[in-house]
Image (spheres, rainbow, N blue to C red):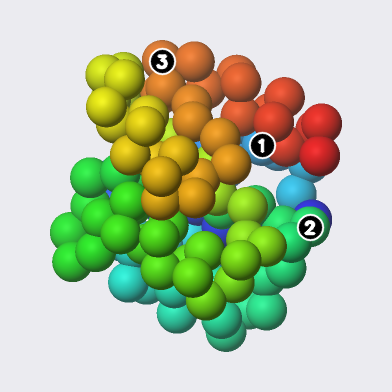
């Protein structure tokens, strides 16, 4: 499985990479949603791969990127990883097509999501 980490904070990207450990064969990293769309296409990610997407990022935020990703690749699996716990953010992520929503305070959940699919 390939995993694309989309997060503007380099330290959080490093933490996510450590967290998923050996679950992924290949890990790609991007700092914003626009770069994520380019990488998804260039690296030929498929429905068996995952995107771990932050919401607030420069250029193209995670909700916009998720919406565009799902438009271009309907089988794309995107899990939002964010600090926003408000229900309206979760609803917006679901409306954009996200397959999961994990709070950064509960990162251990990311491993479970990747392992069960």
Q: Closer to us: mark 3 or mark 2? A: 2
The residue wearing badge 3 is 105
Residue displayed at 24% across by 64% down:
60
Classed neighbour count for the residue bearing mark 2: other residues with Cα under 10 Å, few (<14), some (14–19), many (≥20): few
> Which circle, 2 or 1, is nearer the viewer?
2
Q: How far apart are marks 2 and 1 (CA)?
A: 15 Å
Q: Position of residue 12 (x, y in %)?
A: 39, 37
- Mark pair 3, 1: CA separation: 15 Å
| For the residues bearing labels 2 and 1, Cβ distance under 8 angstroms | no
Q: How many marks?
A: 3
Q: Closest to the observer: 70 or 15? A: 70
Q: Mark 2 points at which residue?
A: 48
Query: Left of 100 or right of it: where is 49?
Result: right
Q: Give percent across and percent down for residue 44.
A: 68, 79
Q: Is residue 47 above or below residue 72?
A: above
- Counting from the top left corner in percent of width and height, residue 47 is at 74, 61
**Which residue sits furthest left?**
58
Indicate whether 3 appears above or below 19: below
- Asked where in the image residue 33 lies, by quadrant, the reply is bottom left
Give above or below for 98 relative to 25.
Answer: above
Q: Where is residue 28 in the image (x, y as percent from the top left)?
A: 56, 62
**Can residue 116 be spotted in the picture?**
yes
Residue 106 in the figure: left or right of residue 35? right
């Amino acid at each position: 499985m390939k995993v694309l980490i989309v997060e503007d904070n380099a330290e959080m990207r490093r933490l996510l990479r450590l967290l998923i450990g050996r679950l992924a064969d290949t890990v790609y990293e991007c700092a914003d949603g626009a770069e994520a769309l380019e990488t998804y296409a260039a690296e030929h990610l498929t429905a068996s791969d995952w995107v771990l997407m932050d919401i607030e990022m420069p250029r193209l935020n995670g909700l916009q990127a998720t919406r565009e990703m799902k438009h271009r690749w309907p089988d794309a699996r995107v899990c939002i990883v964010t600090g926003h716990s408000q229900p309206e953010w979760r609803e917006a992520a679901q409306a954009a097509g996200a397959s999961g929503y994990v709070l950064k305070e509960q990162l251990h959940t990311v491993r479970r999501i990747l392992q069960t699919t």
